[in-house]
Amino acid sequence: MSQQKSLPIRFDPVSFAEHERKLVGSIATKTMSRLRENVRLPDETIEAKLEFSKGFYGYPLVSGQVKTWVTMRCERCLDDVKIELNPDINILVKPEEDIFPEKEGEKDADTPDFYEYDGKSLVLSDLVEEELLLILPLVPKHQDISLCNQDMVAWLAANEARDREPEAIVERAENPFAILKKS
C-alpha cells in the first residue's frame, strides 16, 4: 500500500458535514478487534477516501470507499486466501438517542444505512470496521478451484466420496417407510 497520511481517530461528524470535509489517507487496523477475530491476517492499514456532507434530516452523510486486503481460510482447500475488501460507503451518522422517523416499507436503495455514535465524536475506525465486517464472505474460498491447494482438494474429494457410500447403504437398510411397503 502507498504511504498515506493517517486519518483522525475521533472527530465531530456534524462539523465535518457542515464544512464538507474530505478525508484521504489510511486507518490502522490494530484497534479493529472484531475484524481481527474474523480474519486470519488483516493488512496493517486500510486506504480510505471519504466525503462528509449533510444527508437526510440534516444528519451527517459519510460516503466514499475503503480498501484493504484480508487473509482468510479457504473453505475448499483450507489454505490461506487473500481477499480484497473494497466496500462503497454511504452511511448517515446519527446520535444513538435520536429516533429516525422511518415509515414502514419506504426504505429504498437510495436511502443510506445508519451508524449510531455517542453524539459527541465519531470513532472512524469503528465505522469502517463495521462496514468491512458486513462484506466479509460467509464462505471464503479462492476465486477459482485451480488456485486451491490441489493435494488438499483431491484428499477432500476422496474422503467425501468414501464417506457418502456407507450412508447410502445404511439409508436403504434403515428406511422407516420400508414397513409400509410390506402391508
Image (spheres, rainbow, N blue to C red):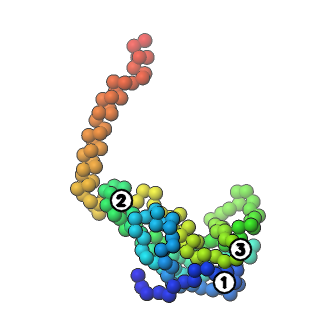
Whether residue 153 sits left or right of residue 182 in the image: it is: left
Mark 1: few/some/many CA within 10 Å (<14, 14-19, 20+): some
The residue under the point 43% across, 87% down is: 3
Can residue 53 be seen in the rendering of this structure? no
Relative placement, left or right, of 123 versus 177 is: right
Q: Earlier in the sequence, mark 1 or mark 2?
A: 1
- Residue 74 tag number: 2
| Of pointers 1 and 3, the one earlier in the residue sequence | 1
According to the image, label 1 marks what residue?
16
Q: Quadrant of the C terminus?
A: top left
Mark 2: which amino acid?
Answer: Cys
Q: Is residue 77 visible?
A: yes
State the SS at label 3.
Answer: loop
Tell me the element at label 1.
Answer: helix
Which dot marks residue 119? Answer: 3
Residue at figure coordinates x 58%, y 76% from the top left: 124
Where does the image place residue 29, in percent across and percent down from the top left? 48, 74
